[in-house]
Amino acid sequence: MAFFIVLGLLVIASFLIVVLQRGKSKVGLAWFIALVASAAAWFVLFLLRLFLPLNLELLSWVPTELFQGTLALSLDYFSWPYAIAIMTLCVASIFTETTVASKKDSSPRWVASLTLTALTLVSLASATPLTLTITWSLIDIAELFYRLRAANPEKDQGAIVRIFSLRVFGTFALIFATAVAWQVQPDFSFDQIPSTAGLFFLLAAGLRLGVLPVHLPFTQGGADSQESKFLFDLAPVASSLTLIARLPGDFLTLNRTLLIIVQVLSAIAMLYGAMMWISRKTATQARPYWIITLSAFALQCALNGDPGSSRVWGLALLLSGGLLFSFNPPIRRIRFLPALGLVGLLGLPYTLCASGWQGVLGQNFGIVSVGVLISHSLLVLGYVRYIAEASGVVTGLEKHARITFPLGLIIIFQTIVLLGLIAWPGVLTAGVWWASLISLAITVLVIITLRVLGIRDLQQDLAYKLPFYRILSPVIRFLRVIFSLSWLYNALTWIYRQVFRLENFASTIIEGDGGLLWSLVFLLIILLFLASGVKLS
Amino acid sequence: MINNTVIIWILIPVALSGILALLQRFAKLSTAIVLVSSALLTVLAFILPEDLILSIGSRQIAFTDSLEIFGRVLKITKANLSLVGGIYLCVFLWNSLARKLETSQWFNALSLLIASLWISALAVQPFLYASVIILLVAVVSIPLLSPRGSRSGAGVLRYVTLQAIAMPLILLSAWMLSDIETAPSASALILRATVLILGGFAIWLALFPVHTWLPMVGQESHPWTLSFLLVVMQSSLTVFFIYFFEEYAWLRNLPNIWEILRWAGIGTIFIASLLLSFQNQIRRLLAYFYLWETGYALLAIGLAQDGGLHYLPLIFMPRILGYAGLSYIIVKLEHLEPDFDGNINNLKGFFHRYPFLSLGLISTLLSLSGLPILASFPAKRHLINLLPWSGYGMETWLILGFVGALIMTFRIIYALVSPSEEEQAIAMLAPQKEDIGIAVFCTALMLLFLISGFFPSIFSGLFKGILAPFENIYLFN
């Protein structure tokens, strides 16, 4: 019931703001309503930690013998940490929005943030595949129309449709994964996923996250992009991450070849994402790669048979990422605040990520584990780089924003700390302490090397000051092309065009003068073929 | 005399269609008559009780359910009335907008006639005589598909030709059937009769590769008219197909027959989806979505052993909504944009100019494709779940089938939201005039898609009686 209070607060606040803004614009009041509602929802959601697990049945399709479909929610140790993370991002986005609120009416964005948060909370609390399928579709359609409404018609439309289509393909992958599991257990909930279907659920989540195979299901912020859109990129990720965390642990009983393919694709996405993350011009442009890399970490945990560990990498994605991406404008004087997000990323003992190392590295240290450590170091390096490059000044801010903006950042940090203590039983652990030290050592080593070489700006100085850059550059470009799988997508496009031409040719023949005869001949052949398959007893 | 179901749902509509043919120039009167009559026939079909005795106050009217005409018996029992109601519901829905959408002036009269002919095809006994009536339907459809004054297209000609070819196949199978009754079960006659029946139905249902008339007629004919003909034909033919399995034990007990039907369904879905993904002409979408839906109907019949038949009536309402939405939007776009040549790539900028029509088109395509929360999803989801996901043979083709339909949908969304190349951005963004009718229709359509998707039981009850006449088909397993 209390969960409905959370949802109700968000929905009612959205509705109130819409009604309020229909008359004379009252931006201040709208912001206050959004803030109070989201903060109250955040508080109630935090209290729910004391009552976990909570199960709520929403609706059963009738007649049950015909439909076998239940819409139900479940708030447990898998979904609650993600719910808190998303709620925190919502509160933080409303706090940090004040830096742009004075320029134009931001109330539609607050309404969108509150609505999206409510939908995401329902989605990540989904207890059955049917609920998740429906909420994914709801989020996708709502997001499509919101983005189309807000987009620049000359530039963004293609990207928006591409993102929508990739997400819908992910939803259909979930439908097919459900069908595989249905053979073992009809109308099951997520805590009953049969191990034979686990990999297919992972594929569905991976497709939606942009990892399997690597692609960008998120917007790439341009120079004029509104940085505050971070919630719209991060929120849809949460429910896919929850799905990964709920998967069964015994994947290895499955088709070994398929498992290896998925593992390789996931490792490619991880390394490619990390490389791209560190080499982008701005944090906003690098955001999709942050999501892909840490999502790949979560997938690795599931593939290593420890899907529960994926939660910490998912939370790092949302919270440490949210802290960095909400740091807009990047004011130099308070850059220590987003730097605190490293607490949730480094994986040092007794911090949030410490319990995630075991899952992502696996039982046996192998080549993928090396890739994980390198990717992690690149993520940390990139994080440090984007904070270090902060050059804004506080004088550009309104007076009230000088208080609310840092507050938004602090809220995210304190959630990182709190979740590191109480997210679920056993979260506070030393973990694999040496892994975090190795990653940290690589990071420090690279920073020292860059300093020694005099490279201050990665974009500009690298070409002049890095030894053997001319040899390294084509190698890196080649690796980027290979890892991005662009060659695969180009090949698929080429095949599509060839089949398109073939289909046109076939249509011309079959719809031409002799087409009727061709049709009948083909029908006869098919019937004879079928007749040969019918064995009379 | 008049309290006979055959007279009410077949003979009176036939007589009315004759009167409407005389009144075809009086558009409003003709439309009013057809709307009132079809609404009454629909309501009566759904409210008539099991015992066919209607109580109005203290008065009770008992209905008889059969009538002999020319030595043949026509029979409409309560079990048949769900489909009958559904067909007249289509007549009502399509006629309510037919004149506004500038269909043929014969539409009122002929739609009623076609509906009554389909019902008589399902009611005639012995039921094999239906094949003659089905050919009659094709002939009667010609004035609608190729109105007076317009050139008769190759598609219509091919449609009638193929229907004429299908008829003797079914009649020949009847001739063989008389021998089968005395033949041993292993007789080659069974195989021949099966091939004839399946061949006849493949042509009737326009399965690949005898589907070619569909896109051709789609291109040539009025979309609203075509969608009516297709929705009534598809619903009636699929039910008629089940009659064969109900009546003939040798057919339903034939080894592999259900697997063949499943493969036929999956193959049809895949081919429809493939053809959809490469399509450029918006008018042809209706034809290929018809093929796609036929695939699902065959799959449902093929999965009868596993309870798939229950989901056949569930597809009816989403299909009616989908076809009506698609054809209405195509007609309206062509009216509002006389320069639009029907090429999907030329839909650029339409999202900003015609927001209601664009949203309606997007939701229609997504619903037909089976997107969750929209109308087609509940039934299609269950059919997918009934497949034996173990060998990944059939399932792989089904997945590919979805991919093609989704590609088409995304291509259209992309075209709709892309800015027009020729026009200035500012001018392009200005919304054009979409009348209140368009806004109401598209909003109602989207709401119905959502309601059907969230609460499938609302419409499932309406057509669940369609399966009532079939008892034997459930006994074979």
Image (spheres, coloured by chain):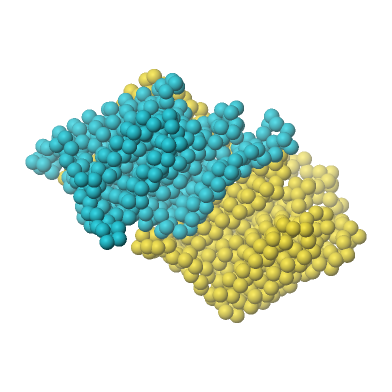
Chain colours: A yellow, B cyan
Spot occupied by residue A283 in the image (x, y as percentages of width and height): 76, 54
Whether residue A327 is visible to the viewer of this picture, yes or no, is: no
Quarter of the image with the N terminus of chain B is top left
| For residue A159, side relative to residue B10 (left or right) | right
Residue lying farthest bottom? A50
What residue is rendered at 29% in x and 50% in y? B81
What residue is rendered at 37% in x and 54% in y? B462
The correct choice, above or below, for B154 with respect to A140 in the image is above
Residue lying farthest front? B58
Spot occupied by residue B83 in the image (x, y as percentages of width and height): 32, 47
Of B4 and A314, the residue lying toward us: B4
Spot occupied by residue B120 in the image (x, y as percentages of width and height): 26, 40
| For residue A58, side relative to residue B49 (left or right) | right
Residue lying farthest right? A395
What residue is rendered at 36% in x and 40% in y? B232
The correct choice, above or below, for B410 with respect to A237 in the image is above
Spot occupied by residue B450 in the image (x, y as percentages of width and height): 51, 54
Whether residue B132 is visible to the viewer of this picture, yes or no, is: yes
| For residue A277, side relative to residue A203 (left or right) | right
Residue A419, quarter of picture: bottom right
The correct choice, above or below, for A463 with respect to B22 in the image is below
Of B228 and A106, the residue lying toward us: B228
Residue A313, quarter of picture: bottom right
What residue is rendered at 84% in x and 68% in y? A403
